[in-house]
Image (cartoon, rainbow, N blue to C red):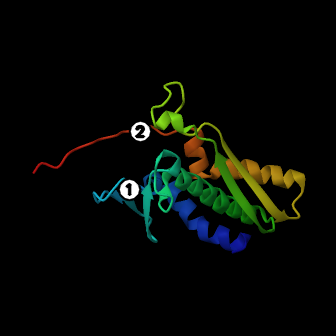
């Protein structure tokens, strides 16, 4: 897809959202099944079912997906797609490259070994290595706009409000 195709594809959507802002609000969802067969759950990704379990550092099965890894995978996927869209919009030729995300976890927190150890991610490092002839100024713009428009990046940077419910089926 080139710049003109992207703009032509997005133009009617932008017009619709300007005229009818409520039409731009979409509820995304994810579902997982707890099948009672161990410490895991099955997540329907829309393309395949992924079985997620505990990280091996917490006693988990290394053949199961770790939700922390899945969060980083969602970040690199969103950042990569966003970077591609921004580059296309700006007319920048990005021939290829890699997107990497990493984070250090102290598993003492989630295992309740040390109360002062945090539970969760502490510092995510997101890196892009691109095959491009873009100038330093163009790369700075590409980085800034990718950060600005990447949904997962922004959701992690400024966490959304959470509402958690738990109910038990009677019977």
- Residue extending farthest left: 171
Location of residue 10 (image quadrant)? bottom right
Residue 96 vertical placement versus 135 (above, below): below
- Can the viewer see residue 26 in this picture? no
Q: Categorize mark 2 by other alpha carbons within 10 Å: few (<14), some (14-19), many (20+).
A: few
Compare residues 126 and 14 and report the one nearer the observer: 126
At x 70%, y 58%, the residue is 99
Disc 1 versus disc 2: nearer the observer: 1
At x 47%, y 37%, the residue is 110
What SS does tag 2 mark? loop
Residue to which mark 1 is pinned = 40
What SS does tag 1 mark? strand
Residue 120 vertical placement versus 78 (above, below): above
Q: Are marks 1 and 2 in contact (CB under 8 Å)?
A: no
Question: Residue 86 appears at what percent x and percent y?
Answer: 71, 59
Q: Quadrant of the N terminus?
A: bottom right
Question: Residue 44 appears at what percent x and percent y?
Answer: 40, 64
At x 46%, y 52%, the residue is 60
- Can the viewer see residue 149 in this picture? yes
- Residue extending farthest top: 116
Question: Residue 163 appears at what percent x and percent y?
Answer: 36, 39
Compare residues 78 and 22 and report the one nearer the observer: 78
Location of residue 12 (image quadrant)? bottom right
Location of residue 96 (image quadrant)? bottom right
Q: Seen in the image, is 96 located left or right of residue 38?
A: right
Q: Identify the disc placed on residue 162.
A: 2
Question: Residue 15 appears at what percent x and percent y?
Answer: 55, 61
| Of the image marks 1 and 2, the number of the one nearer the N terminus | 1
């Amino acid at each position: 897809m080139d710049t003109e195709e992207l703009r032509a594809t997005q133009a009617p959507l932008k017009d619709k959202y300007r005229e009818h802002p409520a039409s731009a609000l979409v509820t995304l969802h994810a579902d997982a099944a707890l099948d009672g067969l161990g410490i895991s759950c099955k997540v329907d990704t829309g393309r395949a079912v992924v079985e997620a379990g505990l990280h091996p550092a917490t006693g988990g099965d290394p053949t199961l997906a770790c939700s922390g890894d899945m969060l980083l995978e969602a970040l690199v996927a969103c950042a990569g797609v966003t970077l591609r869209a921004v580059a296309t919009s700006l007319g920048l030729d990005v021939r290829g490259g890699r997107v990497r995300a990493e984070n250090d976890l102290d598993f003492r927190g989630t295992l309740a070994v040390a109360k002062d150890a945090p539970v969760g991610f502490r510092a995510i490092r997101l890196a892009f290595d691109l095959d491009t002839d873009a100038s330093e100024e163009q790369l700075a713009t590409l980085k800034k706009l990718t950060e600005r428009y990447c949904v997962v990046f922004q959701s992690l940077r400024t966490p959304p409000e959470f509402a958690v419910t738990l109910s038990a089926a009677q019977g």
